Image: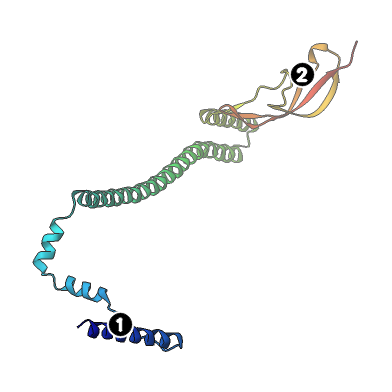
Amino acid sequence: MEKVEIEKDKNIEENNKEKEEKTDRGTPIKVKVVDKRSSVLTKEEEIPDDVLKELEKRKPTYVEKLLSEIEEKKQQLLELSQAYRKLQADSEQFRIRLNKDVENRVFKGKASFLRDFLEVLDNLERGIEAAEKNKDFDSFLEGIKLIRSQFLQKVEKNGIKEINAKGEEFNPQYHEALNILAVDKKEEDNKVIEVVEKGYMINDDVLRPAKVIVGKFNGK
């Protein structure tokens, strides 16, 4: 009995030796590969739907919490996006309304200003027509003076006023010196001694500086 077992062991060793020799000589060894993934997939596919649903219901609490937070953030992002688009639209509409309002105010201001001067123009035309008929120079001159007075009232009503210049200290902010003349009086030094063209202010801004001649005292 022991002899038979010994012979079997020898046969096994010889077979193993032959396999090793064949391997050393480059003879390919056939290896059986078993793809366990397919078996796993098959097992998953074989899980009944009701079992899968039950497993789905049994998600861990933290997973459910994360999913809930994700949905909440998505909703917040959507609301913010909608609010931003609405704000953009409202801003654009406000800008358009503001521009129209400014344009309307400017137009109304111009219309009111020019309407006042149309009255002056009407009176000037009436004065010219009367002078042509009567040929009375004194009456014509008086009419022109009245029209001038009316004109000044209209411009003052719109914030325009004359710059006081003659006898005032020369100020380059309000005066434009056209010439400098020598004067005999010391008190006239650096003073406006003549106004060539009147200047005007509109509210607190210079509309046009007065063109003047300035005195220079050279005496001792």
Q: Please determine whether, in this image, residue 148 is positioned above or below residue 98.
A: above
* Residue type, label 2: Lys
Sequence-earlier tag: 1 or 2: 1
Q: From where the camera sits, is residue 30 visible?
A: no
Residue 191, located in which quarter of the rendered image?
top right
The CA span between labels 1 and 2 is: 119 Å
**Dot 2 crowding, Cα within 10 Å, few <14, some 14–19, many 20+:** many
12 or 69: which is nearer to us?
Answer: 12
Check disc 2 and report its element: helix, strand or loop. Answer: loop
Q: Are marks 1 and 2 in contact (CB under 8 Å)?
A: no
101 or 181: which is nearer to us?
Answer: 101
User: Residue at (22%, 81%) from the top-left corner?
Assistant: 2
Location of the C terminus by quadrant is top right
Image side of residue 111 versus residue 167, left or right:
left
* Residue type, label 1: Lys
Check disc 1 and report its element: helix, strand or loop. Answer: loop
Looking at this view, name the residue that lies furthest to the right. 220
Q: From where the camera sits, is residue 215 visible?
A: yes
**Dot 1 crowding, Cα within 10 Å, few <14, some 14–19, many 20+:** few
User: Residue at (42%, 86%) from the top-left corner?
Assistant: 21
Residue 200, located in which quarter of the rendered image?
top right
Give the residue at mark 2.
191
User: Residue at (18%, 70%) from the top-left corner?
Assistant: 44
Give the residue at mark 1.
32
Residue 56: x percent and y percent?
15, 60
